[in-house]
Structure formats: structure tokens, C-alpha cells
Amino acid sequence: MGKLTKKAENLLILAWAQAFIAMAGSLFYSEVMGYIPCELCWFQRILMYPLVVIYAVAAIKKEINIALPGLVFSGIGMFVSAYHYLIQKVPAFQEMGGACIGGVPCNVVYVDYLGFITIPFLALTAFTIISILHVALLINTRKNKGGNN
């Protein structure tokens, strides 16, 4: 693929930064605060952590095709995070959250900032931002491919 525009490079770097902040935040909550991740938290980590590497490599090599799996991972991550958030906040879903395999039920709320911001909400926000940045990157790249600089 041709050379990326400065805007495309910046979008890749922003996606990487968002993934890195989300990864650092999850490690802070587990390693510093001592919160044990539940099963759904682990799935979210499995989907988030590779994004740090994917977007870093894509930004360094200036190659958007390398970042394509990032859109898939972040898309799936949005659904997992939204489901996890529903388990924590919606009474009809809370009963399902106690059935998660492992030592910590998925309906446990470690943090609850402003009455609605929980760890799965933070993950949902990060996955959504990454997805939006990636779609903007694709639009920018297609626009520039057609000769509209």
C-alpha cells in the first residue's frame, strides 16, 4: 500500500494510545488495586492487549493492512464489554453473572464512579473509541486512494 497521510498516521497512533491506556488501566486495577479479574474481564483483556501490538506495528511500518485485525478485535470487544456491563447493571442480567466460571462472579462491581462507570464500561468506551478511530482511518485511506487529498 502507498504512503499513509499524516492524518492516517495520527489515527493509528491514537488507536495505539487508547489500547495502551486501556491495557495499563486493567493492569493497574488487577496488580495495584488487587482486583481479581472475572472470566469476562479475561476475555476483554484477550481482545484488548493484542491491539497494543497491532497498532504499534501498523504505525511503525505505516501500513494500514496490518491494523485490520484491530477492527475485528475491538468490534468483538465492544460486544463482550456491553454484555458484561449489562450483567453488572441490569437486574435481569445480574443472575446470569453469578454463573461465570472461576473464583470471581462476573456481576461483582469493584468500582462504580458516578453511579454508572464500572470497569466493563471503561473497556466498552475504549473498544468503541478504537473502533471509531479505525473506521475513520479506513475512510481517510479510501478517500486519499481515490485522489481526494
Image (cartoon, rainbow, N blue to C red):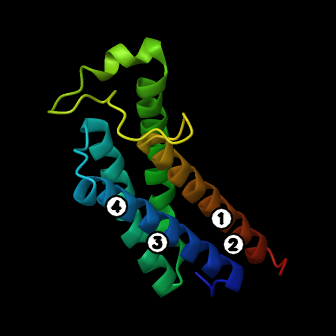
Packing grade of label 2 (10 A; few <14, some 14-19, many >=20) is many
Question: Can you identify the residue that label 2 sits on?
Answer: 141
Give coordinates of residue 101: x percent, y percent.
Answer: 18, 28
Check the image and report above or below for 103 versus 69.
Answer: above
**Which residue in the protein does label 4 denote?**
49
Between the C-alphas of marks 1 and 3, the distance is 14 Å
Mark 3 or mark 2: which comes first in sequence? Answer: 3
Q: Earlier in the sequence, mark 1 or mark 4?
A: 4
Identity of the amino acid at label 1? Leu
Are the two marked residues, 1 and 2, in contact with CB atoms closer than 8 angstroms? yes
Front position in the image: 101 or 131: 101
Residue bearing the label numbered 3: 55
- Near mark 1 (Cα within 10 A), the count class, few <14, some 14-19 or many ≥20, is some
C-alpha separation, residue under disc 3 versus residue under disc 4: 11 Å
Disc 1/disc 2 C-alpha distance (Å): 5 Å
Q: Is residue 77 left or right of residue 39?
A: right
Does 24 sit above or below residue 9? above
Question: Quadrant location of residue 50?
Answer: bottom left
Q: What's the amino acid at mark 3? A: Tyr
Per the image, label 3 sits on a secondary structure element best described as helix
